Image (spheres, rainbow, N blue to C red):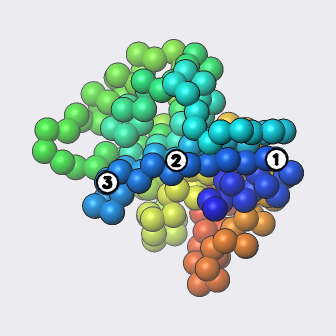
Amino acid sequence: MSLVDQAAVNEGYDVRSSELHGLSQRGGSVETHVRFGKKVYSPLISNGNVDLIISLEMLEGLRETAKAGKQTKFLINDFVSPFQGSLTKEEIKKQLGELKNEMHIVSASDICKEKLQNEVVSTIYLLGYAVDKKLIPIKAESVLKAIEKLVPEKYRDLNIKAFNLAK
């Protein structure tokens, strides 16, 4: 169960989620669908019906634009994984800028590296940003309870700091 799943359960939502692993074992992207509400029947979200796309890498965020509808909001880490033939950060931002969607490009990796000396928690920072900016209808208290429940004790304080840093 993910932190978002647990936080939604903490608020009394019915939750369904699905993780599509792909190349995750080799450092590739992992696509996760999370749906929550009064009653949810399927974890998968059809193209055009996505409310929020959170991406840990800019090119990954650009790839996900095909799934977006007019109402879809984007929260993208301002980070580009270096690999041969990649678009530059400026090229990606230009293409993302052509969309009419609400777009949040945040330097989560840089902020976490500078403030916490650990960019791995940029995911938690982005979740904190999404909660703080009301991009996701979950309360901060519910996420903090989820962190307490799901994150191993030795990493808990760091994750709480990363989540709160986004406020």
Question: Disc 2 on helix, strand or loop?
Answer: strand
Q: Residue furthest bottom?
A: 154
Label 2 amino acid? Thr
Question: Disc 1 on helix, strand or loop?
Answer: loop
Badge 3 local density, few (<14 within 10 Å), some, or many (20+)? few
- 35 sits to left or right of 97: right
Question: Disc 3 on helix, strand or loop?
Answer: loop
- 60 sits to left or right of 14: left
Q: Which quadrant of the structure image shows residue 45?
A: top right
Q: Residue at x 69, y 68 (%)?
A: 147
Q: Is residue 53 above or below residue 132?
A: above
For marks 3 and 1, the one nearer the N-term is 1
Q: Residue furthest front?
A: 41
Q: Residue at x 31, y 59 (%)?
A: 27
Q: Is residue 93 above or below residue 167?
A: above
Q: Residue at x 43, y 26 (%)?
A: 65
Label 1 amino acid? Tyr
Residue highlighted by disc 1: 13
Residue highlighted by disc 3: 23
